[in-house]
Image (spheres, helix red, strand yellow):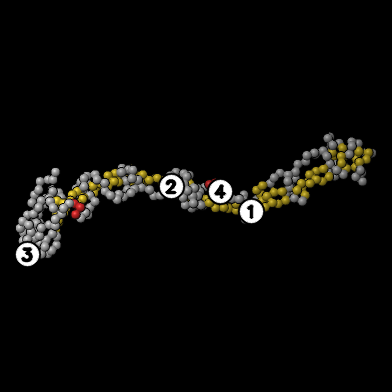
Amino acid sequence: MRPLPFWLALGAALGGCGESFVVGAAPPSSGGSSGEAGAGATVSTSSSGAGGSAAGGGEGAAPPAPCNGPESCPPPPTPCAHAACLDGVCGSEPEAYGAMVPNQIPGDCQTAICDGNGGEASLPEDGDFPNDGEQCTIEYCSGGVPQQYNENPYSWCDQNGGTMCDGDGHCVACLNAWDCPLGDSPCAGTYCDEQHQCGYDFVAQGTTIWEPYGDCRKYVCDGAGNAQELADYGDVPGDPDPHDCKVPVCKDWGPDWKKKDDNSACGKDNKQFCCDKTCCPQGQVCDDNDKCVAAT
Protein backbone atom coordinates (compact mmCIF):
# COMPACT_ATOMS: atom_id res chain seq x y z
CA MET A 1 0.00 0.00 0.00
CA ARG A 2 1.32 3.49 -0.88
CA PRO A 3 2.09 5.76 2.12
CA LEU A 4 -0.25 8.64 2.83
CA PRO A 5 0.26 11.46 0.29
CA PHE A 6 1.30 14.96 1.17
CA TRP A 7 1.58 18.15 -0.82
CA LEU A 8 4.53 18.55 -3.01
CA ALA A 9 5.52 22.20 -3.28
CA LEU A 10 6.96 23.40 -6.54
CA GLY A 11 9.73 25.98 -6.66
CA ALA A 12 9.73 29.02 -8.87
CA ALA A 13 11.38 28.96 -12.26
CA LEU A 14 15.23 28.89 -12.11
CA GLY A 15 16.31 30.13 -15.50
CA GLY A 16 14.85 27.14 -17.32
CA CYS A 17 16.79 24.60 -15.19
CA GLY A 18 15.02 21.70 -13.45
CA GLU A 19 15.27 20.67 -9.80
CA SER A 20 14.96 17.32 -8.04
CA PHE A 21 14.47 16.59 -4.37
CA VAL A 22 13.42 13.84 -1.99
CA VAL A 23 9.78 13.81 -1.14
CA GLY A 24 9.42 14.31 2.55
CA ALA A 25 12.21 16.91 2.79
CA ALA A 26 11.52 20.59 3.20
CA PRO A 27 10.29 22.06 -0.12
CA PRO A 28 12.61 24.55 -1.84
CA SER A 29 10.10 27.42 -1.93
CA SER A 30 6.37 27.75 -1.45
CA GLY A 31 4.11 29.01 -4.11
CA GLY A 32 1.53 26.39 -4.81
CA SER A 33 1.00 22.64 -4.66
CA SER A 34 0.91 19.79 -7.12
CA GLY A 35 0.56 15.99 -7.08
CA GLU A 36 1.52 13.65 -4.27
CA ALA A 37 4.36 11.03 -4.01
CA GLY A 38 5.27 8.16 -1.72
CA ALA A 39 7.35 9.01 1.36
CA GLY A 40 11.09 8.40 0.92
CA ALA A 41 10.91 8.55 -2.91
CA THR A 42 12.64 11.07 -5.15
CA VAL A 43 10.70 13.12 -7.71
CA SER A 44 11.82 15.65 -10.28
CA THR A 45 10.20 18.88 -11.35
CA SER A 46 11.02 21.20 -14.18
CA SER A 47 10.31 24.87 -14.78
CA SER A 48 9.58 26.81 -17.89
CA GLY A 49 10.29 30.35 -18.86
CA ALA A 50 9.03 33.33 -16.87
CA GLY A 51 5.42 34.21 -17.31
CA GLY A 52 4.08 30.65 -17.20
CA SER A 53 2.02 29.16 -14.41
CA ALA A 54 2.26 25.84 -12.54
CA ALA A 55 -0.69 23.76 -11.51
CA GLY A 56 -1.97 24.94 -8.16
CA GLY A 57 -0.36 28.39 -8.46
CA GLY A 58 3.20 29.65 -8.26
CA GLU A 59 3.89 32.12 -10.99
CA GLY A 60 6.49 31.03 -13.58
CA ALA A 61 6.45 27.31 -12.63
CA ALA A 62 5.36 24.49 -14.95
CA PRO A 63 3.87 21.20 -13.83
CA PRO A 64 6.23 18.14 -13.71
CA ALA A 65 6.46 15.93 -16.78
CA PRO A 66 3.80 13.28 -16.53
CA CYS A 67 4.56 9.55 -16.53
CA ASN A 68 2.36 6.56 -17.04
CA GLY A 69 4.58 3.98 -15.32
CA PRO A 70 8.16 3.32 -14.21
CA GLU A 71 9.09 2.12 -17.69
CA SER A 72 8.69 5.69 -18.96
CA CYS A 73 11.13 7.07 -16.34
CA PRO A 74 14.95 7.17 -16.55
CA PRO A 75 16.88 4.69 -14.36
CA PRO A 76 18.42 6.06 -11.14
CA PRO A 77 22.23 6.44 -11.03
CA THR A 78 22.58 3.85 -8.27
CA PRO A 79 22.02 0.09 -8.64
CA CYS A 80 20.24 0.07 -5.30
CA ALA A 81 17.20 2.03 -6.50
CA HIS A 82 14.69 1.56 -9.27
CA ALA A 83 12.67 3.99 -11.33
CA ALA A 84 9.18 4.75 -10.08
CA CYS A 85 6.22 6.78 -11.34
CA LEU A 86 4.89 8.49 -8.23
CA ASP A 87 1.51 10.18 -8.72
CA GLY A 88 2.35 10.80 -12.33
CA VAL A 89 5.85 12.14 -11.60
CA CYS A 90 9.14 10.26 -12.33
CA GLY A 91 11.18 9.39 -9.28
CA SER A 92 12.92 6.41 -7.67
CA GLU A 93 12.43 3.95 -4.84
CA PRO A 94 15.20 2.08 -2.95
CA GLU A 95 15.76 -1.62 -3.44
CA ALA A 96 15.03 -3.86 -0.49
CA TYR A 97 17.78 -4.49 2.05
CA GLY A 98 19.94 -7.45 1.02
CA ALA A 99 19.27 -7.18 -2.69
CA MET A 100 22.40 -8.27 -4.57
CA VAL A 101 24.34 -5.54 -6.32
CA PRO A 102 25.15 -6.50 -9.91
CA ASN A 103 28.76 -6.64 -11.12
CA GLN A 104 30.27 -8.02 -7.93
CA ILE A 105 34.06 -7.66 -7.48
CA PRO A 106 35.48 -11.20 -7.73
CA GLY A 107 37.94 -12.41 -5.13
CA ASP A 108 37.43 -9.64 -2.51
CA CYS A 109 35.88 -11.91 0.13
CA GLN A 110 32.82 -9.63 0.18
CA THR A 111 29.27 -9.61 -1.19
CA ALA A 112 27.89 -6.19 -2.13
CA ILE A 113 24.23 -5.71 -1.19
CA CYS A 114 21.76 -2.87 -1.02
CA ASP A 115 21.26 -1.22 2.37
CA GLY A 116 17.55 -0.53 1.91
CA ASN A 117 18.07 3.23 1.65
CA GLY A 118 19.37 3.40 -1.89
CA GLY A 119 23.01 2.90 -0.91
CA GLU A 120 25.36 -0.08 -0.93
CA ALA A 121 26.74 -2.20 1.90
CA SER A 122 28.92 -5.31 2.00
CA LEU A 123 28.85 -8.59 3.87
CA PRO A 124 31.75 -11.01 4.44
CA GLU A 125 31.75 -13.89 1.95
CA ASP A 126 34.53 -16.39 2.63
CA GLY A 127 33.61 -18.37 -0.46
CA ASP A 128 34.64 -15.45 -2.69
CA PHE A 129 38.38 -16.03 -2.29
CA PRO A 130 40.99 -14.55 -4.64
CA ASN A 131 43.17 -16.53 -7.04
CA ASP A 132 46.55 -15.22 -8.23
CA GLY A 133 46.94 -18.04 -10.76
CA GLU A 134 50.09 -19.41 -9.08
CA GLN A 135 50.11 -23.12 -8.25
CA CYS A 136 52.49 -22.63 -5.32
CA THR A 137 50.24 -20.26 -3.38
CA ILE A 138 46.94 -20.92 -1.61
CA GLU A 139 44.41 -18.09 -1.32
CA TYR A 140 41.44 -18.06 1.03
CA CYS A 141 39.16 -15.73 2.98
CA SER A 142 38.99 -15.34 6.75
CA GLY A 143 36.19 -13.21 8.13
CA GLY A 144 35.87 -11.37 4.84
CA VAL A 145 39.60 -10.60 4.56
CA PRO A 146 41.75 -12.12 1.77
CA GLN A 147 44.56 -14.36 3.03
CA GLN A 148 47.39 -16.29 1.38
CA TYR A 149 50.03 -18.87 2.28
CA ASN A 150 52.67 -20.74 0.29
CA GLU A 151 52.74 -24.41 -0.58
CA ASN A 152 55.43 -26.51 1.11
CA PRO A 153 58.79 -27.04 -0.63
CA TYR A 154 58.74 -29.91 -3.14
CA SER A 155 54.97 -29.64 -3.64
CA TRP A 156 54.06 -30.45 -7.23
CA CYS A 157 53.69 -27.72 -9.87
CA ASP A 158 54.22 -27.34 -13.61
CA GLN A 159 54.50 -23.60 -14.26
CA ASN A 160 57.34 -21.46 -15.61
CA GLY A 161 59.35 -24.52 -16.58
CA GLY A 162 59.40 -25.79 -13.00
CA THR A 163 58.34 -29.04 -11.39
CA MET A 164 58.34 -28.22 -7.66
CA CYS A 165 57.43 -25.40 -5.27
CA ASP A 166 60.24 -23.62 -3.46
CA GLY A 167 58.24 -22.76 -0.32
CA ASP A 168 58.17 -19.06 -1.26
CA GLY A 169 55.30 -19.28 -3.70
CA HIS A 170 57.31 -20.00 -6.87
CA CYS A 171 57.40 -23.00 -9.19
CA VAL A 172 61.06 -23.85 -9.86
CA ALA A 173 63.20 -26.51 -11.51
CA CYS A 174 65.28 -27.54 -8.49
CA LEU A 175 66.07 -26.90 -4.85
CA ASN A 176 69.21 -29.07 -4.69
CA ALA A 177 71.63 -30.61 -7.17
CA TRP A 178 70.06 -34.04 -6.80
CA ASP A 179 66.78 -32.61 -8.09
CA CYS A 180 68.35 -32.11 -11.52
CA PRO A 181 68.29 -34.87 -14.14
CA LEU A 182 71.62 -36.47 -14.90
CA GLY A 183 73.17 -35.80 -18.28
CA ASP A 184 74.08 -38.37 -20.88
CA SER A 185 77.68 -38.45 -19.65
CA PRO A 186 78.97 -39.32 -16.17
CA CYS A 187 81.62 -36.65 -16.78
CA ALA A 188 79.08 -33.81 -16.43
CA GLY A 189 77.90 -33.28 -12.87
CA THR A 190 74.68 -31.41 -12.04
CA TYR A 191 74.13 -28.38 -9.81
CA CYS A 192 71.21 -26.13 -8.81
CA ASP A 193 71.97 -22.40 -9.06
CA GLU A 194 70.64 -19.48 -6.99
CA GLN A 195 67.73 -19.03 -9.41
CA HIS A 196 66.78 -22.67 -8.84
CA GLN A 197 67.77 -23.65 -12.36
CA CYS A 198 69.71 -26.81 -13.17
CA GLY A 199 73.21 -26.63 -14.65
CA TYR A 200 76.16 -28.93 -15.34
CA ASP A 201 79.78 -28.98 -14.16
CA PHE A 202 82.50 -30.88 -16.07
CA VAL A 203 84.47 -33.49 -14.15
CA ALA A 204 88.23 -32.87 -14.14
CA GLN A 205 90.28 -34.33 -16.98
CA GLY A 206 91.80 -37.75 -16.23
CA THR A 207 89.28 -38.67 -13.56
CA THR A 208 88.61 -42.41 -13.75
CA ILE A 209 84.90 -43.10 -13.83
CA TRP A 210 84.87 -46.79 -14.68
CA GLU A 211 87.50 -49.52 -14.64
CA PRO A 212 86.19 -53.03 -15.23
CA TYR A 213 88.47 -55.60 -13.59
CA GLY A 214 90.89 -57.53 -15.79
CA ASP A 215 90.00 -56.13 -19.23
CA CYS A 216 93.14 -54.00 -19.55
CA ARG A 217 91.05 -50.84 -20.08
CA LYS A 218 89.66 -47.90 -18.14
CA TYR A 219 87.34 -44.95 -18.81
CA VAL A 220 88.27 -41.42 -17.83
CA CYS A 221 86.85 -37.90 -18.30
CA ASP A 222 88.35 -35.57 -20.88
CA GLY A 223 87.53 -32.35 -18.95
CA ALA A 224 84.87 -31.31 -21.47
CA GLY A 225 82.05 -33.46 -20.18
CA ASN A 226 82.88 -36.54 -22.23
CA ALA A 227 84.13 -40.00 -21.29
CA GLN A 228 87.01 -41.63 -23.17
CA GLU A 229 88.44 -45.14 -23.17
CA LEU A 230 92.14 -45.69 -22.45
CA ALA A 231 94.40 -48.73 -22.26
CA ASP A 232 95.30 -49.78 -18.72
CA TYR A 233 98.22 -52.19 -18.74
CA GLY A 234 98.07 -52.53 -15.00
CA ASP A 235 94.56 -53.97 -15.14
CA VAL A 236 95.86 -57.55 -15.62
CA PRO A 237 93.27 -60.33 -15.42
CA GLY A 238 93.59 -62.98 -12.74
CA ASP A 239 95.56 -66.20 -13.34
CA PRO A 240 93.12 -69.11 -13.51
CA ASP A 241 95.95 -71.69 -13.06
CA PRO A 242 98.93 -70.39 -11.11
CA HIS A 243 100.63 -73.81 -11.34
CA ASP A 244 101.06 -73.82 -15.11
CA CYS A 245 103.77 -72.06 -17.07
CA LYS A 246 101.80 -69.08 -18.34
CA VAL A 247 100.99 -65.76 -16.71
CA PRO A 248 98.31 -63.25 -17.83
CA VAL A 249 99.38 -59.85 -19.15
CA CYS A 250 97.82 -56.84 -20.92
CA LYS A 251 98.75 -56.32 -24.55
CA ASP A 252 97.27 -54.24 -27.36
CA TRP A 253 94.32 -52.96 -25.26
CA GLY A 254 93.33 -56.45 -24.09
CA PRO A 255 94.30 -59.51 -22.03
CA ASP A 256 97.05 -61.84 -23.26
CA TRP A 257 99.49 -64.47 -21.97
CA LYS A 258 103.24 -64.87 -21.73
CA LYS A 259 105.36 -67.82 -20.72
CA LYS A 260 107.12 -68.07 -17.43
CA ASP A 261 110.86 -68.10 -17.42
CA ASP A 262 112.41 -71.50 -18.08
CA ASN A 263 112.94 -73.62 -14.98
CA SER A 264 110.44 -71.52 -13.02
CA ALA A 265 108.57 -73.64 -10.47
CA CYS A 266 105.32 -75.21 -11.64
CA GLY A 267 103.13 -78.14 -10.82
CA LYS A 268 100.79 -78.75 -7.95
CA ASP A 269 103.57 -78.73 -5.39
CA ASN A 270 105.78 -76.32 -7.34
CA LYS A 271 108.39 -79.08 -7.52
CA GLN A 272 108.45 -79.20 -11.31
CA PHE A 273 110.01 -76.84 -13.79
CA CYS A 274 108.72 -74.80 -16.72
CA CYS A 275 110.14 -75.17 -20.19
CA ASP A 276 108.69 -73.02 -22.97
CA LYS A 277 105.15 -72.82 -21.48
CA THR A 278 105.31 -76.52 -20.57
CA CYS A 279 105.59 -77.88 -17.08
CA CYS A 280 108.19 -80.67 -17.33
CA PRO A 281 107.44 -83.98 -15.66
CA GLN A 282 108.81 -84.40 -12.20
CA GLY A 283 112.54 -85.20 -12.26
CA GLN A 284 113.14 -83.26 -15.50
CA VAL A 285 114.46 -79.78 -16.20
CA CYS A 286 114.58 -77.44 -19.20
CA ASP A 287 117.76 -77.41 -21.27
CA ASP A 288 119.12 -74.62 -23.45
CA ASN A 289 116.99 -75.78 -26.35
CA ASP A 290 113.71 -75.43 -24.40
CA LYS A 291 113.44 -79.16 -24.08
CA CYS A 292 112.56 -81.10 -20.96
CA VAL A 293 115.43 -83.46 -20.14
CA ALA A 294 116.28 -85.66 -17.21
CA ALA A 295 117.85 -83.84 -14.34
CA THR A 296 121.46 -84.72 -13.71
Q: CA distance from mark 1 to mark 3?
A: 105 Å
Instruction: Kindly report which numbered mark, 4 or 3, lies closer to the viewer in this rendering.
Output: 3
Q: Nearer the viewer, residue 54 or 134?
A: 54
Q: Which residue is mark 1?
A: 226
Residue at x-position 42% and y-position 49%? 134
Q: CA distance from mark 4 to mark 3?
A: 93 Å
Q: Nearer the viewer, residue 239 or 254?
A: 254
Q: Above or below — where is 278 with respect to 25? A: above
Label 3: how many residues lie within 10 Å, few (<14), some (14-19) or many (20+)?
Answer: few
Label 2 amino acid?
A: Gln
The disc, 1 or 4, on the residue closer to the chain's N-terminal end is 4
Q: Which residue is mark 4?
A: 181
Q: Give the left or right position of residue 222, taking residue 152 as reference.
A: right
Helix, strand or loop status at disc 1: loop
Mark carried by residue 135: 2
Q: Give the left or right position of residue 100, taking residue 287 as reference.
A: left
Q: Nearer the viewer, residue 3 or 156?
A: 3
Mark carried by residue 51: 3
Label 1 amino acid?
A: Asn
Quadrant of the rendered image containing residue 30: bottom left
Instruction: Kindly report which numbered mark, 1 or 3, lies closer to the viewer in this rendering.
Output: 3
Label 2: how many residues lie within 10 Å, few (<14), some (14-19) or many (20+)?
Answer: some
